[in-house]
Amino acid sequence: MTKIDLNKLPRHIAIIMDGNGRWAQQHTIGRIRGHKKGAESVRTVVRACREIGIKYLTLFAFSQENWERPENEVKALMLLLEEYLTKEIEELQEQGIRLVTIGETGLLNSSVREKLQRAKETTAKNDKMILNLALSYGGRDEIIHAVKKIIDDKEKGKVDINKITKDDFSNYLYTSGMPDPDLLIRTSGEYRISNFLLWQTAYTELYFTNVLWPDFTKDDLLKAIASYQQRERRFGLTSEQLKEKLTSE
Ligand code: IPE
Ligand code: IPE
Ligand code: MG
């Protein structure tokens, strides 16, 4: 197993879980079976993150754009989500994991919405790790949604537009209250963001791997964390400035 430094963990990991379809193709089976295998990787990674001590895990499970996929695939993905929510709730509870979501979850069918609601309520008091599922999520729409809420608050006299800071704006996003991701992982050898967490990833470290999501293991996760730990997050400063900052702290 890859070694990582437990004192330098990313607080928040976000993952674009990609490659289920290509995995299925490689195994000459249908795409839906690829998604089923992908759901197993979700279990592995959630468990591993909890074990390691990651505080926030955001998984891109279904994008706004994914609604345009063939109807039978969308249906299968929704059923898989329901199945996950039903089967995993007990383990989430045992492990002290709280489930939350980001995205236009109002667009999900009522049966999925109910199960989500139940899972959120049941796990609401857990504080070991936050598992954040991005469902019917699109980053640009999230920003528009935030702008509309700000306008609304302005009309109600609740906000002074001239005084809005970056932190204030962050609090209007679906991810309000969560730290920005420190590490973003994308599987399957695609090098793009695909409308995921556009605002929040401004200074996130990006990690791309060719591994297809259904093949993604705990060791692949550790490799991503190890790579993250070797990077210098300069946030616009020079290396020397960072070192000075560290010694003065
Ligand atoms: C990711 O796998 C799962 C979802 C987007 C829901 P894909 O289904 O996108 O797999 P590829 O990209 O076709 O291989
Ligand atoms: C991104 O994967 C969305 C999820 C992982 C849920 P896609 O497979 O939909 O992304 P694109 O279309 O290839 O960019
Ligand atoms: Mg894909």
Image (cartoon, rainbow, N blue to C red):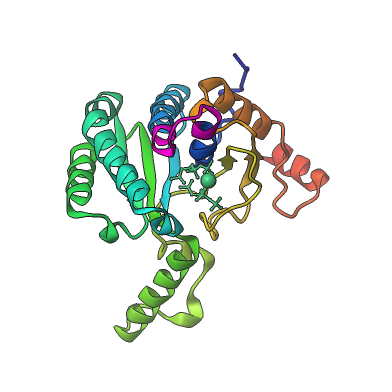
What percent of the width, then of the height, locates residue 131? 37, 39
Q: Residue at x 61, y 56 (%)?
A: 202
Residue 144 lies left or right of residue 109; in this view the side is right
Q: Main secondary structure of the magenta part?
A: helix
What percent of the width, then of the height, locates residue 6? 56, 23
Up/down of 180 relative to 230, above or below = below
Where are the magenta residues, as a range? 24-35
Q: Quadrant of the C terminus?
A: top right
Q: Residue at x 27, y 41 (%)?
A: 79
* Res. 126 visible in picture: no
Task: Judge by depth and name the residue closer to the eye, 8 or 120.
Answer: 120
Q: Residue at x 24, y 29 (%)?
A: 87
What percent of the width, then of the height, locates residue 119? 22, 40
* Residue 6 among those drawn in magenta: no
Please identify the quarter of the rendering in which residue 247 is found. Answer: top right
Count of labels in the image: 0
* Res. 22 visible in picture: yes
Residue 158 lies left or right of residue 37; in this view the side is left
Q: Residue at x 27, y 29 (%)?
A: 88
Q: Quadrant of the N terminus?
A: top right
Please identify the quarter of the rendering in which residue 83 is found. Answer: top left
- The residue most toward the top is 1
Task: Judge by depth and name the residue closer to the eye, 109 or 158.
Answer: 109
- The residue most toward the front is 28
* Residue 29 among those drawn in magenta: yes
What percent of the width, then of the height, locates residue 43? 38, 27
- The residue most toward the bottom is 155
Residue 101 lies left or right of residue 17; in this view the side is left
Task: Judge by depth and name the residue closer to the eye, 240 or 147.
Answer: 147
Up/down of 39 relative to 198, above or below = above
